[in-house]
Image (spheres, rainbow, N blue to C red):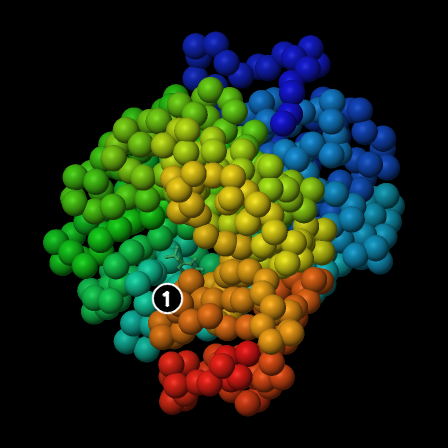
Amino acid sequence: MIHRSGTERRSTIGGNAAPRYRVYTRKHIDELPQLARLSRDERDAMKAVSAVLPFRVNNYVLEELIDWSNIPEDPMYQLTFPQPEMLRRRDFQRVFELVRGDAPEDELKAVAREIQYRLNPHPAGQMDLNVPRVDGEPLPGVQHKYRETMLVFPAAGQTCHAYCTYCFRWAQFVGIQELKFASRESSNWVRYLKVHPEVRSVLLTGGDPMVMTAKVLRRYVEPLLDPSLEHIRSIRIGSKAAAYWPYRFLTDKDAGDVLKLFEEVVASGRHLAFMAHYSHPHELEPPVAQEAVRRIRETGAVVRCQAPLIRRVNDSAEIWADMWQRQINVGAVPYYMFVERDTGPRNYFEVPLVRAHEIFRDAYRSLSGLGRTVRGPTMSATPGKVMVDGVARVGGEKILVLKFLQARDPRWVGIPFFARYDPEATWLDELEPAFGARRFFFERGDGELLGKGDRRVADSLTPMELG
Ligand SMILES: *Cc1c(COP(=O)(O)O)cnc(C)c1O
């Protein structure tokens, strides 16, 4: 655990007044008093990395979450501040030299773009595979991958109170227009929902929908409460605001309006799930952070918690056990542990799947059943959400046992399948089928995913084919 020195600096947050949100980005790197302890090289390195990867913090993260006596190791610092090793050495050198040489902004931007495009900006086919259509027209800013759940990316919610350095949606924040995923209009996706009764759940995501004012958030939530959409049984809001800016639910000008909107969703007979992103137990330590959860729960919403497993931030069983226990203490529900996705600075943060499973298992074992609602570690991969269920030995072969928690084809869910044991693999595409099988059951002979036209169904496959 982190222990505050308490002497290092006095917080400007607190007292009775409503704290004012202050945001700091790349252009503030030389001005931030907390960064004055860094050398010029270190600050220029930060400017170099943040020319490629998005960087944004706020006064609460700076003053309440980061332990400045413990940088660069402090997990909250790793979580929010760019580090030189996040880029490949050669890429880093290139941008660093441009920053050092005071290169013109457009030259820096051009080089940054080139690097960004090499970082797999939109993993799991999210730009084209999962976009639904109305009358043949694609719905911008909407994803419908799993039968029951539709994702909406509200245009006004495409930023966050602070950015996580590992964010898999980083491409949303660096201003690549053709990669930007955002919905302005609710009328089109409401039309889509009316003719898709299989959708039970709508998930507002981003960015962070809680950066929107209550008034704008209402424009996305209210249409879902229409009597013609009775089949929408739950509304979820994916957000890091409770961790990065808890005042959103306490003292912000429209905090009351936000909570009232939550109450209206609950009063409509629907489940409102506040999908809270907590990366480290420390985020639940400040009393205001706990108070935010209490206020959200008071509306009748359920707070469910999810986060990826990230090297240098939360890669130990003790951290996860502590985090899940704190979530349970405040009445929140541990939900998913994700595997860091194959995008952006993943090399800096990745944890091998076998190790991820060990961390999950050891943390899970330490909890009572109340915490065992959590599932993971799970990869949000192109075919679906694949969980690493464990390591086993079958007939002398050491294997990884996997299964889909969600899948593009709902028939794939819950069927165990097996990969050769590989202690280094960090993603599904690095795994080989076990037992000498040539492909996984959800793949065709050519390595492509089975599609709607393919008749092979997992139920009819032999164990060899399930390899
Ligand atoms: C994770 C995810 C969901 C939600 O899945 P649940 O298992 O219901 O939480 C929906 N759509 C996409 C594309 C996802 O990645």
Which residue is nearer to you in this view: 338 or 130? 338
Whole-percent x, y for residue 450 in the image: 46, 83
Residue farthest to the left, as pictured: 227
Which residue is nearer to you in this view: 425 or 297? 425
Which residue is nearer to you in this view: 81 or 191? 81
- Residue drawn at x 76%, y 53% is 87
Whole-percent x, y for residue 324 in the image: 48, 37
Residue where numbered disc 1 is placed: 146
Query: Quadrant of the rendered structure where residue 293 is?
Result: top left
Q: At label 1, which amino acid type do we have? A: Tyr
- Residue drawn at x 65%, y 20% is 3
Compared with 31, 389 (above or below) is below
Query: Quadrant of the rendered structure where residue 77 is?
Result: top right
- Residue drawn at x 45%, y 66% is 404
Whole-percent x, y for residue 232 in the image: 22, 56
From the Cβ of disc 1, is ligand 1 less than 8 Å away? yes
Q: Ligand 1 is found in which quarter of the picture?
A: bottom left
Which residue is nearer to you in this view: 321 or 306? 321
